Image (spheres, rainbow, N blue to C red):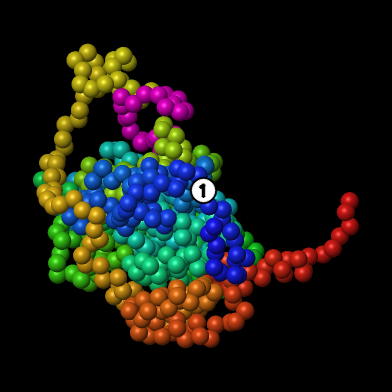
């Protein structure tokens, strides 16, 4: 039998399956050994197989592909993550410059090349962890996904409001999300589960520092930043590449909420951000964001104390300045929420000519996962839906699949020919517009973490960059969620906070020593305290009435 040692949880029992098939073990595994669904013992659950420890990833990552493709199918039909969302139509207007230089120096992507050129787009803002009808006041990263309908086809820039992420290797994404999603037994979000994961994964400390501060609850969608998070490549006509990161800055200014302020809003309206966005556009107060890029030469950059492909890190602005490239304006609300906001489907692999993938392991894992999710969630023909379809000619040899309602056939294509090559009227390959980027890749195929991890420095820098009230809010929210946790988890977390910054760790440690003794339940939203008492209060305050 398996028993949960925490008496606060009621000593839940889980019956162990004693069937013969589950008794068999290889010489390399015990009763606690992790396996995949084929029964293969998993020898490395921390890293994908990559060429060298920086990547790129290899396609034969069976453990990763099984893990992520199952994870992509965990919810029907709601998105596994980013379930709660709001969206709007608009356009992107290029400045015709990257900073003070012409875009063609760095990229041949057409939408950036001409000053004033407008590209239609659709944006979906979202919360990450919680479901379709969850409150928009919960502490959570916010999704910030933009679909550009360019003349070369769609470009999806899929990111978050925060500029970093919890993990640097996509194989850990299901684990991270499982820890932050509700407990599979109680269906309640549980801070002990979250910090059990974080305390064993120090690379998440930078993101945790942002998430438990006021930056973890944006006031609305109009007044929050956005970021592509991942590192991409830009490629010019000569096939030369640079590394690039994307940042959206709201022209409305940035506003965030404290835990107390968010709770007060939630008590009256849990759809406030959706309402705010819809009403602003409806009255003609169109939200705008400026798009900036940071550019870095496509190298390993040993002079930095972190790997530039590490999604848990910021690129220092003083070394890699923000260069403006254009602006986004949202000027039209959806006509039908389900058809547009719910069925819109993004993917990090949706790039146009002049853009390319970097070896960022999170980007490479997401590129499989996102489009795989959409084919499962919306269907294999999801790109035929108007909200997802490119606003240009489409001609493919793809046929069939659930919910096909047209054939993407070329104007002069022989309808009998759905293969290539052909001499009797089939589709033909396009000419290569610019020189193809052909990065050199060399190294052993390994499962390893990157060398320059430096898990704590930027988290400490971020803490020290906060104003006093932001630090106060951060400490209170961390203590509220950590106080009911197992003491071993608390000890590990305090030690990691101290490695980020001595004052940071000291304040959390002191806060835990003086935490309210009645705060004994971890089954509460992140940063909240006192929610466990809600069922009792509801019964106590409920008004007795006669049946009818």
Task: Please give left or right for residue 294 compared with residue 391 in the image.
Answer: left
The dominant secondary structure in magenta is loop
Q: Is residue 172 above or below residue 212?
A: above
In this rendering, is residue 304 above or below 426?
A: below
Front residue of 455 and 267: 455
**Residue 159, located in which quarter of the rendered image?**
bottom left
Q: Secondary structure at mark 1?
A: loop
Residue at 15% from the left image edge and 52% from the top image edge: 444
Q: In front: 45, or 327?
A: 45
Q: Is residue 192 found left or right of 391 in the rendered image?
A: right
Residue 325 in the figure: left or right of residue 467: left
Classify residue 135 by image quadrant. Answer: bottom right
Q: Position of residue 395 (x, y in %)?
A: 31, 26
Residue drawn at x 51%, y 48% is: 18
- Residue 218 visible (yes or no): no
Q: Which residue is mark 1?
A: 18
Residue located 53% across and 52% down the image: 16
Q: Quadrant where the N terminus lies?
A: bottom right
Q: Nearer the viewer, residue 188 or 503?
A: 188
Q: Is residue 485 left or right of residue 94?
A: right
Please tell me how many numbered marks the rendered image carries. 1
Percent of width and height locating residue 433: 16, 37
Q: Which residues are magenta?
A: 382-406
Residue 176 seen: yes
- Mark 1 crowd level (few <14, some 14–19, many ≥20, 10 Å Cα): few
How far across and how far down the image is residue 55, in percent?
21, 53
Q: Is residue 260 magenta?
A: no
Q: Nearer the viewer, residue 404 or 364?
A: 364
Residue 429 horizontal/vertical position (percent)? 20, 28
């Amino acid at each position: 039998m398996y028993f949960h040692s925490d008496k606060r949880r009621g000593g839940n029992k889980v019956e162990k399956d004693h069937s013969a098939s589950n008794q068999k073990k290889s010489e390399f595994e015990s009763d606690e050994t992790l396996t995949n669904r084929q029964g293969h013992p998993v020898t490395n659950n921390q890293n994908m197989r990559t060429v060298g420890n920086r990547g790129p990833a290899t396609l034969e990552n069976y453990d990763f592909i099984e893990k992520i493709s199952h994870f992509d199918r965990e919810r029907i039909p709601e998105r596994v993550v980013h379930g709660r969302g709001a969206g709007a139509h608009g356009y992107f207007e290029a400045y015709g410059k990257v900073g003070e230089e012409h875009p063609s120096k760095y990229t041949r992507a057409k939408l950036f090349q001409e000053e004033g050129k407008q590209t239609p787009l659709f944006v979906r803002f979202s919360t990450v962890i919680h479901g379709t009808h969850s409150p928009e006041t919960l502490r959570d990263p916010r999704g910030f996904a933009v679909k550009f309908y360019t003349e070369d086809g769609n470009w999806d820039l899929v990111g978050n409001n925060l500029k970093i992420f919890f993990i640097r290797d996509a194989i850990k994404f299901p684990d991270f999300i499982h820890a932050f999603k509700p407990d599979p037994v109680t269906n309640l979000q549980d801070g002990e589960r979250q910090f059990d994961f974080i305390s064993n994964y120090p690379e998440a400390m930078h993101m945790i520092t942002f998430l438990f501060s006021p930056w973890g609850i944006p006031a609305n969608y109009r007044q929050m930043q956005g970021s592509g998070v991942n590192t991409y490549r830009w490629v010019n006509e000569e096939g030369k590449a640079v590394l690039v990161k994307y940042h959206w800055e709201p022209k409305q200014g940035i506003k965030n909420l404290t835990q107390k302020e968010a709770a007060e809003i939630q008590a009256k309206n849990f759809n406030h951000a959706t309402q705010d966005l819809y009403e602003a556009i409806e009255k003609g107060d169109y939200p705008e964001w400026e798009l900036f890029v940071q550019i870095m030469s496509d190298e390993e950059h040993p002079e930095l104390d972190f790997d530039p492909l590490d999604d848990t890190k910021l690129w220092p602005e003083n070394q890699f300045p923000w260069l403006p490239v254009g602006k986004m304006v949202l000027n039209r609300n959806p006509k039908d929420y389900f058809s547009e906001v719910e069925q819109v489907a993004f993917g990090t692999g949706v790039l146009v000519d002049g853009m390319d993938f970097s070896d960022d392991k999170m980007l490479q894992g997401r590129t499989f996962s996102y489009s795989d999710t959409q084919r499962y969630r919306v269907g294999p023909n999801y790109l035929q839906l108007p909200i997802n379809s490119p606003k240009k000619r489409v001609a493919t040899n793809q046929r069939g699949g659930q919910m096909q309602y047209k054939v993407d056939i070329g104007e002069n294509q022989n309808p009998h020919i759905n293969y290539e090559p052909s001499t009797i009227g089939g589709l033909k390959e396009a000419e290569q517009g610019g020189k193809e980027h052909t990065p050199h890749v060399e190294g052993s195929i390994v499962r390893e973490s990157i060398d320059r991890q430096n898990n704590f420095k930027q988290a400490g820098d971020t803490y020290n960059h906060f104003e006093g009230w932001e630090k106060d809010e951060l400490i209170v929210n961390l203590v509220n969620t950590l106080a009911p946790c197992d003491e071993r988890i608390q000890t590990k977390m305090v030690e990691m906070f101290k490695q980020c910054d001595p004052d940071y760790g000291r304040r959390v440690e002191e806060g835990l020593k003086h935490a309210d003794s009645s705060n004994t339940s971890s089954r509460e939203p992140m940063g909240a305290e006192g929610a466990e008492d809600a069922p009792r209060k509801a019964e106590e305050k409920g008004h007795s009435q006669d049946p009818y």
